[in-house]
């Protein structure tokens, strides 16, 4: 039986105004930063293998910063794919590993290659609703979350829980795109087409927004080992770098808090993915 691996996990965490740590989401094709490495660069290099092939859709451009960072860790090569016509790769694992952009490519590529983050992990992490189901079952702090099938579901969710506001995000989304914050005052005028895209509605966690800045924390876990993280700050509640968030280093005291919960999250997701 093939082993399920979550080699490289990007976890998003927040700290609420009372100092409690909350899980927000996991990513299986994470952007990561040199500031996250601490003293774990050799461990991350080993996780990626001596050679890394990235299989990407034609036209998708990785940032120069990201490419240079990967090249500092391993021999890096990109294979571009048009119309899902995958290259006939047959690598020599564990020296050469493959990272694939699309989850649906992984079951095919896994036949002859070692894939960074198994297809089962990608299926779980790309579905934000299943993310929350898995992590909340492990008694890790997660926001209350529902699958929003209609605008009435969203309104009911807000009223039954007496929320001042919620976050509405695509069930299958990335880079902070199409995320909305909805408050009680928006309910009468609120409209959304749920036929074109699935959404989840989620409790809005109040953070300590000192100096009117919102913060979250992108954590890197490589082969179940905590490798540090970066703090993202913004004047907006959605703090993604692609939307204007700024990077800061995480204080050492927080690294000590984040390590056990981050490793527990990754192990929980590995165990949950076996049942998909």
Image: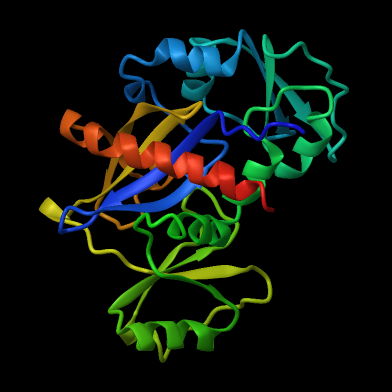
Report the colour scheme. Answer: rainbow
In front of the other: 214 or 163: 163
Q: Is residue 129 above or below residue 235?
A: below
In front of the other: 255 or 4: 4
Q: Is residue 38 above or below residue 273?
A: above
Q: Residue furthest left?
A: 211
In front of the other: 127 or 168: 127
Q: Residue furthest bottom?
A: 188
Q: Is residue 249 visible?
A: no
The image position of residue 142, as x and y in percent, is 38, 60
- Residue at image location 60% in from the left, 13% down from the top: 49
Q: How many marks?
A: 0
Figure quadrant of residue 144: bottom left
The image position of residue 181, as x and y in percent, is 38, 69
Image quarter (top left, top right, bottom left or bottom right) of the N terminus: top right
Q: Is residue 86 visible?
A: yes
- Residue at image location 38% in from the left, 83% down from the top: 158
- Residue at image location 37% in from the left, 64% down from the top: 143
Q: Is residue 184 above or below residue 247?
A: below
Q: Is residue 75 left or right of residue 89?
A: left
Q: Is residue 195 above or below residue 110?
A: below
The image position of residue 233, as x and y in percent, is 26, 44
């Amino acid at each position: 039986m093939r082993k399920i691996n979550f080699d490289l996990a990007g976890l998003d965490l927040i700290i609420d105004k009372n100092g409690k740590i909350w899980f927000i989401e996991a990513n299986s094709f994470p952007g990561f930063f040199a500031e996250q490495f601490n003293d774990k660069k050799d461990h991350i290099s080993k996780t990626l293998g001596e050679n890394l092939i990235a299989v990407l859709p034609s036209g998708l451009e990785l940032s120069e910063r990201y490419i240079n960072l990967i090249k500092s860790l391993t021999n890096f090569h990109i294979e571009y794919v048009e119309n899902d016509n995958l290259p006939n790769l047959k690598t020599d694992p564990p020296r050469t590993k493959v990272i694939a952009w699309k989850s649906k490519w992984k079951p095919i590529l896994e036949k002859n290659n070692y894939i960074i983050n198994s297809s089962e992990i990608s299926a779980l992490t790309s579905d934000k609703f299943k993310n929350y189901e898995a992590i909340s079952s492990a008694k890790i702090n997660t926001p209350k979350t529902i699958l929003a099938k209609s605008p009435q579901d969203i309104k009911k969710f807000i009223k039954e829980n007496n929320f001042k506001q919620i976050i509405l995000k695509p069930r299958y989304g990335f880079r902070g795109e199409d995320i909305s914050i909805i408050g009680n005052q928006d309910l009468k005028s609120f409209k959304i087409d749920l036929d074109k895209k699935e959404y989840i509605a989620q409790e809005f966690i109040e953070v300590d927004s000192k100096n009117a800045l919102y913060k979250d924390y992108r954590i890197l876990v490589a082969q179940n080992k905590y490798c540090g993280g970066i703090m993202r700050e913004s004047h907006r509640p959605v703090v993604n770098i692609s939307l204007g968030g700024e990077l800061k280093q995480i204080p050492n005291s927080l690294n000590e808090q984040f390590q056990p919960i981050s490793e527990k999250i990754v192990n929980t997701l590995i165990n949950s993915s076996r049942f998909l």
